[in-house]
């Protein structure tokens, strides 16, 4: 429910359904009967936030408690922000319409570095100071979780707490603690010091960071008893882990609006650019029976007619065939499609694929990521040209006419030959189509290639690598386009400036806080939206604060440099990452976890056990 | 397979749901209620569901029809109960019936409009002014249609119109052309009237109360 004052303005904004609440399965409680009010804040639009699985999990998890009420908050689009500012309407929870300023916890989920300015804007719209030190009361405590907090240093001045790793257990522990400290009227400082003792909780203000003359980090020193290293949380058993049975069903069309159930966390592949693959190790698997039961429950409570089985690499799930075979009878009966995102077409049984309607509809995608075998070895993407071509050939024989290929440019050791290799691989797929004797008559083939730019991320073997500057990336993109000789291949590319800014924050440090605040004050927000990104304003903001952004992106870091995120522990050891980086430069691959444990170290988070190998490794 | 006409009421938060989004919303509700829907044959089967008259964003509907096709034996009462048990806030099935009239028999709709003004004087002035404009039979406005924007005389699409002021509010009860061929959105009428006096409302509620046939008898 929205605040009453908003009523007469709602029809003036685009998609008012973003701001009204009241969707099916949204949860309204009696506020006088709860101790903790939790605002789950997503720093992007309703449509994107409502597609996010993590939000659905935490929303249900907090609301399963009688003593807490979790509401949803999204970043209002510019038109709504204007209405709110003009009419002094504070940012509110969608369920109650109450200002979140009066809540106990504001929990942001940080999936993308380019939503940092939106966090500041949302705090400001809530009527709160953006800097943690200026929010002196115990509540609201501003918390953040999600991928980006593996290096939350650029946002360290704004968040009170970040939560590392899986949120399912630590969220409840934090709520319990705050409830206790609120009841005894404790100070914010006392609460933060106590919170820092919970595993997975990072309190940035309890760490002093000193810098060297050359702007690299000299030392990170904990104080007030905060741990030297903050270890991420790891839920050991996904079967018994909390998982929602209901999703809020939006009225509006959102990006992903379907039943989504995770089948495993972590990844066995070890692609060297992939942050998610390393942050979520070790591999933990949900059993097929539990997955199926959860899918059924959500379909029943929502009426969804599509199920997405999600993970970082769906076809690596042991038991996928069993799962699909068990699910097909009832899903066919109830006209439910099964979608398998992140499917590696190379190792998925053809017969099963044919039975999956949804796969057919969404078309065939491959992610070779690099154009030559040499470069694929560098990034440890073990997919060969033959695999791509033979699967494409099979698909063409089955009547497909469109293939989508995902690539990256700006990879370490990349040469012109590698870039041209992208065009060549696409061309080879086109040729494969025309080799097929049974190709559909009168139909052409369409191979679309999507080219992203590498953003080296913390906790990957590429965390020491320089990132190509935007002008270099533009040259590379243009070169690639010049290598494409046929109209059957279409190229879509990313905005290099976006990757650049993402890179600055991904490997940034605390000195970026002033830049972020300056840029936000000058009107930057929704930086991930091409139509909202303001490169000149950002450039001004860097300059005004005397910060050279290329210091964070363009420089090769030494292995022994203290990295701003070195006090975070995600399980995977630095020694392993260094070794992987060296192997990358030698073009050596590392076998996937299923073939051989590479000794990444993440299994220590799981009592020495990794689901993938089923036993303790040393 | 048989056709069933659902009649729903849309108010509260649900009025901010667009016509396009309503379709998805009802398909899901029918699935949750486990109503045995009839699906089209073919590669990509989908249920048959038709909204007879789009209700514009922001308007309340008291009795709006949707035709669906079902399979198997299920009573109208049971359909209604099952659906109401799973409907989101603001949407309610008020009746389930056999489709008596053909969809293209819809020719008009009755609306009740309440608009609030800054003060009673303004409300009274607007009521009097609006009445004389409608009585004059000429109110030109730009109307958007599939063929583009056209200047039309809205009065030709008004079947009846009553307006009165009560303190700061005005109440309108009007019957407007509705349907596939000629259709007048109540909001367009009101904004055309407001622009004649450069007036602005403080609050506005538009309620579509019933759908009517050409002879102004009720569309069943
Ligand atoms: S411990 Fe071994 S098997 Fe497990 S994720 Fe790390 S490298 Fe892979």
Image (spheres, helix red, strand yellow):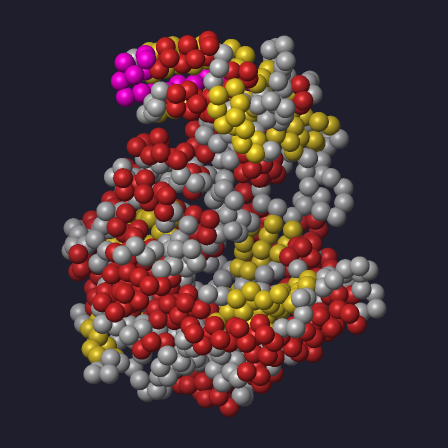
In this rendering, would A472 be left or right of A424?
left
Above/below status of B132 relative to B90: above
The outermost residue toward the bottom is: A586
Above/below status of B50 relative to B135: below
Residue B171 can be seen, yes or no: yes
Q: Position of residue A321 (x, y in %)?
A: 67, 63
Above/below status of A131 relative to A245: below
Query: Which is nearer the eye, A159 or A516?
Result: A516
The region drawn magenta spans B109-125
The outermost residue toward the right is: A437
Q: Position of residue B154 (x, y in %)?
A: 51, 19
Question: What residue is at 30 percent from the left and 41 percent from the top?
Answer: A84
In this rendering, would A246 be left or right of A132?
right
Q: Position of residue A259 (x, y in %)?
A: 55, 50
Question: What residue is at 36 percent from the left and 63 percent from the top?
Answer: A535
Above/below status of A115 relative to B202: below
Residue A456 can be seen, yes or no: no
Question: What residue is at 42 percent from the left and 50 percent from the top?
Answer: A45
Quarter that holds the C terminus of chain B: top right
Q: Position of residue A359 (x, y in %)?
A: 66, 58
Q: Is residue B118 magenta?
A: yes
Query: Which is nearer the eye, A44 or A614?
Result: A44
Q: Is residue A502 magenta?
A: no
């Amino acid at each position: 429910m929205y605040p009453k004052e908003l009523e007469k303005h709602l029809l003036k904004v685009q998609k008012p359904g973003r701001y009204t609440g009241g969707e099916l399965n949204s949860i309204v409680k009696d506020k006088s009967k709860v101790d903790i009010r939790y605002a789950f804040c997503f720093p992007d639009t309703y449509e994107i936030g409502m597609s996010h699985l993590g939000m659905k999990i935490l929303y249900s998890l907090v609301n399963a408690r009688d003593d807490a009420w979790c509401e949803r908050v999204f970043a209002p689009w510019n038109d709504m922000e204007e209405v709110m500012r003009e009419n002094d309407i504070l940012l509110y929870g969608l369920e109650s319409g109450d200002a979140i300023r009066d809540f106990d916890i504001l929990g942001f989920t940080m999936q993308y570095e380019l939503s940092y300015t939106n966090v500041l804007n949302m705090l400001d719209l809530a009527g709160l100071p953006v800097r943690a030190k200026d929010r002196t009361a115990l509540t609201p405590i501003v918390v953040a979780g999600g991928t980006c907090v593996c290096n939350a240093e650029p946002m360290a001045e704004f968040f009170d707490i970040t939560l590392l790793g899986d949120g399912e257990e630590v969220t409840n522990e934090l709520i319990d603690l705050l409830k206790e400290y609120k009841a005894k009227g404790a100070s914010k400082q006392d609460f933060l010091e106590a919170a820092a003792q919970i595993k997975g909780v990072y309190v940035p203000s309890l760490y002093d960071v000193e810098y060297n003359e050359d702007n690299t980090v000299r030392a990170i020193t904990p104080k007030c008893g905060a741990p030297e290293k903050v270890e991420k949380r790891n839920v050991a058993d996904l079967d018994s882990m909390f998982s929602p049975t209901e999703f809020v069903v939006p009225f509006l069309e959102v990006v992903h609006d379907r039943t989504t159930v995770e089948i495993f966390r972590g990844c066995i592949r070890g692609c060297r650019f992939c942050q998610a693959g390393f942050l979520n190790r070790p591999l933990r698997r949900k059993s097929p029976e539990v997955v199926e039961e959860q899918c059924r429950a959500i379909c029943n409570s929502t009426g969804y007619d599509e199920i997405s089985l999600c993970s970082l690499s769906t076809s690596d799930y042991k038991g996928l065939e069993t799962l699909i075979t068990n699910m097909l009878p009832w899903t066919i009966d109830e006209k439910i499609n099964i979608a398998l995102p992140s499917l590696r077409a190379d190792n998925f049984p053809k017969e099963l694929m044919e039975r999956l309607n949804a796969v057919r509809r969404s078309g065939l995608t491959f992610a070779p990521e690099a154009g030559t075998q040499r470069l694929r070895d560098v990034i440890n993407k073990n997919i060969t040209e033959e695999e791509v071509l033979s699967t494409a050939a099979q698909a063409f024989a089955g009547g497909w006419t469109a293939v989508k290929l995902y690539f990256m440019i700006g990879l370490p050791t990349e040469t012109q030959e590698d870039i041209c290799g992208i065009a060549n691989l696409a061309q080879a797929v086109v040729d494969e189509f025309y080799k097929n004797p049974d190709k559909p008559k009168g139909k052409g083939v369409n191979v679309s290639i999507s080219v992203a730019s590498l953003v080296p991320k913390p906790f990957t073997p590429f965390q020491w690598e320089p990132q190509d500057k935007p002008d270099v990336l533009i040259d590379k993109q243009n070169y690639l386009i010049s290598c494409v000789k046929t109209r059957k291949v279409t190229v879509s590319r990313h905005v290099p400036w976006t990757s650049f800014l993402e890179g600055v924050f991904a490997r940034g440090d605390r000195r970026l806080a002033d830049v972020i605040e300056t840029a936000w004050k000058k009107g930057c927000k929704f930086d991930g939206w091409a139509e909202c990104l303001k490169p000149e304003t950002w450039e001004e903001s860097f300059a005004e604060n005397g910060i050279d952004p290329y210091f964070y992106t363009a420089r090769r870091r030494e292995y022994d440099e203290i990295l701003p995120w070195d006090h975070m522990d995600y399980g995977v050891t630095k020694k392993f990452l260094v070794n992987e980086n060296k192997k990358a430069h030698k073009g050596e691959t590392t076998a996937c976890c299923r073939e051989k444990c590479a000794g990444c170290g993440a299994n220590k988070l799981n009592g020495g056990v990794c689901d993938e190998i089923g036993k303790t490794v040393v | 397979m048989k056709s069933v006409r659902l009649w729903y009421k849309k108010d509260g938060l649900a009025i901010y749901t667009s016509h396009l989004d309503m379709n998805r919303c009802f398909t899901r509700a029918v699935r949750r209620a486990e109503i045995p829907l009839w699906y089209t044959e073919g590669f990509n089967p989908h249920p048959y569901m038709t909204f007879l008259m789009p209700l514009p964003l922001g308007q309340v509907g008291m009795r709006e029809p949707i035709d669906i096709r079902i399979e198997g034996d299920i009573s109208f009462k049971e359909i209604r109960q099952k659906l109401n048990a799973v409907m989101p806030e603001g949407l309610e099935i008020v009746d389930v019936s056999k489709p008596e009239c053909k969809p293209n028999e819809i020719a008009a709709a009755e609306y009740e409009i309440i608009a609030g003004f800054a003060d009673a004087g303004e409300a009274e002035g607007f009521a009097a002014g609006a009445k004389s404009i409608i009585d004059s039979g000429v109110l030109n406005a730009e109307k958007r249609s599939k063929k583009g924007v056209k200047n039309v005389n809205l009065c030709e699409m008004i079947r009846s119109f009553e307006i009165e002021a009560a303190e700061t509010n005005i109440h309108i009860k009007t019957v407007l052309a509705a349907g596939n061929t000629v259709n007048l959105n109540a909001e367009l009428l009101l904004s055309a009237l407001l622009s004649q006096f450069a007036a602005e409302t403080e609050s506005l509620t538009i309620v579509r109360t019933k759908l009517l046939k050409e002879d102004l008898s009720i569309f069943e």
